[in-house]
Amino acid sequence: MRALAIVLLLLMGNLSPAQSYYDIANEKTGNISFTQVELIGMWTVVKVMVGNRELTPTAKWFKYESTGKITGGNGNIQNLNGAYTFDRENKTLVQSNKNEVDSYGAFNVSFSDDGKYMAWQRMEDGMEVNVLLEKASDKPSAPWDLIVGGWTMSKAELLDPETKQVQKTLDLERNRYFFMWDRAYRKFNAAGEQVETGVWHIGGHSNEVWTINNADNTKTIWQVEFSKKENHMTWTKEDENGLLKVYFEKVANND
């Protein structure tokens, strides 16, 4: 649907403009200056609202350069390489995709007084689109970046779904998972024997991790969270017994 153009913009594929960024911008705007202290730099997307629906992409970032070049992506995956024009006086922003300016036109842009936040707004097919971004120094880490590597299961708990209080601690074999960059995974028991293989997936708009077993194509969906130091991970899912929470520890490279 055209109304979801902002989502497509945020998740757009590889862009390879044949013209220079200056050429694209100058054709569309007539030499508008790019030296805007408010806009230049790295921004991460905090929230996207299309009408009353939240469609915030995971770990989305944009980097604006003074030359009119824009790059962007999700976590360590770069999927935008194009051009932008920013009209400082009118506070409007247009971004280009493969030399084609966004057909919905410019976003109205505003900044917080401290310059930490930027907001985009425009109408698309009668629906109001609002995007909130935050100034950043680095690209955000996405769950699919953090999960790659080895993880050992350390404990498991059964929680009350409403209160989130621990009802009991479960007996757990310290299985080890290895999640590979190509979306394959392997599972080993405590003795080091491989007991399962499959594929994993994390969606672009959620923190759900899917594991699909190669043996019988069983798909299991968990909510995944990482600690601030990124060396601990938890998986949670609800079943008939309650809310199951499994804790993992990152395997050191020399383990």
Image (cartoon, helix red, strand yellow):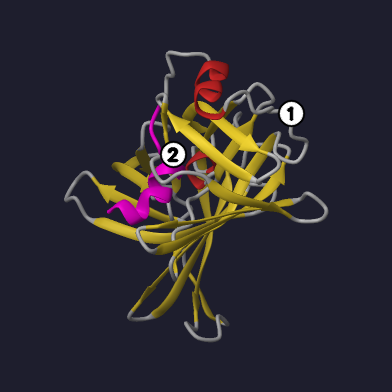
Disc 2 marks which amino acid? Answer: Phe
Residue underneath mark 2: 178
Badge 1 crowding class, 10 Å Cα cut-off, few under 14, some 14 to 19, many 20 or more, is some
- Percent of width and height locating residue 186: 36, 39
Q: Nearer the viewer, residue 202 or 236?
A: 202
* Residue 202 vertical placement versus 254 (above, below): below
Residue farthest right in this picture: 114
Place residue 244 in its image quadrant. bottom left
First reached walking from the N terminus: tag 2 or tag 1: 1
Residue at 71% x, 34% y is 40
* Residue 52 vertical placement versus 253 (above, below): below
Q: Nearer the viewer, residue 65 or 110?
A: 110
* Residue 13 vertical placement versus 154 (above, below): above
User: Is 240 on the left-hand or right-hand side of 68?
Assistant: left
Disc 1 marks which amino acid? Answer: Thr
Residue underneath mark 1: 35
- Percent of width and height locating residue 222: 40, 61
The span from disc 2 to disc 1 (Cα, nearest Å) is: 46 Å
Q: Which of 223 and 61 is in front in this view?
A: 61
User: Is 116 on the left-hand or right-hand side of 74?
Assistant: right
Is residue 234 in view from this perspective? Answer: no
Most common SS among magenta residues: helix
Asked whether residue 23 is drawn in magenta, I would say no
Query: SS of the residue at dot 1?
Result: loop
Q: What stretch is highlighted in magenta?
A: 1-14
Query: SS of the residue at dot 2?
Result: strand
Residue at 46% x, 13% y is 19
User: Is 134 on the left-hand or right-hand side of 13?
Assistant: right
Is residue 182 in view from this perspective? Answer: yes
